[in-house]
Image: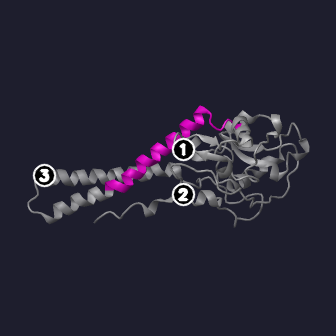
Amino acid sequence: MRILPPRTFPPPDKIERRHAPVPAEGRHGYRSYRSCVRWEFGFTCAFCLLHEADLTAHGVEGTGLTGIEHFVPVSQADERVNEYWNCFYACRFCNEARADAPAMGFGARRLLNPCDHAWGVHFQLGEDDRLSPRAGDADAAYTEFVYDLNDRRKIEIRSWRRERLEELLKVLRDAPASAQELVDWCSSVEPVPGKDLLLRTAQGLWDDTRRALRDLQRFIAIPRDAAISCRCGRVDHHELPPYLAEQTLEVADLVPARPV
């Protein structure tokens, strides 16, 4: 099971489009691209980098927590409503914050497109969990303002994921080893004062490990409701974007086998 990292750092390269769905028709045809854009952007908001798991523990489908953002707003270019390259995966916070703000702001500042500009070049994730524009980057500052990338709720969500995952990973790192030490002590020394208590403590540590593994399922990188097919008609591109895949953690590598 691969899970999210405690902190998702902005991609060092622009996000490459891998999907090319059959063009849709009608005013809301673009909605048929949803499966494509979920995979395309790694179930992550293309702008603030919140993952679906940050928004709910039970799957986002049908909740309205995520949707398709038109980079060039439909109100400004109705003919581009079903243009796939104009569609991005976005959380509800970013979508509502932007509304129909123009791609070009005052003073020739432009809204950055994550498929044309590497987020890691323009933004940095600070220790305070803020996704901040790099110094002197007017375009990044405009993008941060338009999408409200550091909405108080977004910062709190980033902090919550970091703190919770660090807690759970610490349990996986420390509890099994401590339990093994207690078991080894009880097996190698006779008599052992308080042996039953020590073994119960070891059992409690293994129970903590089991609960941590259960709770880590909340942070699975590819949601269980991820579509097995999309409008493209192929599945070979159903993978996380490289920048996110490289940051994920394999839980099996973190937990030693329980002693018999």
Q: Quadrant of residue 188?
A: bottom left
Left-right relation of 169 to 227? left
Label 1–label 2 contact, CB within 8 A: no
Residue 103 % position (x, y): 81, 40
Q: Which residue is disc 2 drawn over? A: 248
User: Can residue 102 be seen from the camera position used here?
Assistant: no
Of the pair 113 and 168, the residue shown nearer to us: 113
Residue 174 % position (x, y): 33, 54
Of the pair 121 and 23, the residue shown nearer to us: 121
Q: Which residues are magenta?
A: 147-175
Position of 186 relative to 129 (above/below): below
**Label 1 is placed on what type of residue?**
Ala
- Residue 158 falls within the magenta-colored stretch: yes
* Structural distance between the alpha carbons of marks 3 and 2: 42 Å
Q: Which residue is disc 3 drawn over? A: 194
Instruction: State the residue at coordinates (37%, 56%).
Output: 173
**Label 3 is placed on what type of residue?**
Gly
Instruction: State the residue at coordinates (71%, 60%).
Output: 229
Position of 124 relative to 13 (above/below): above
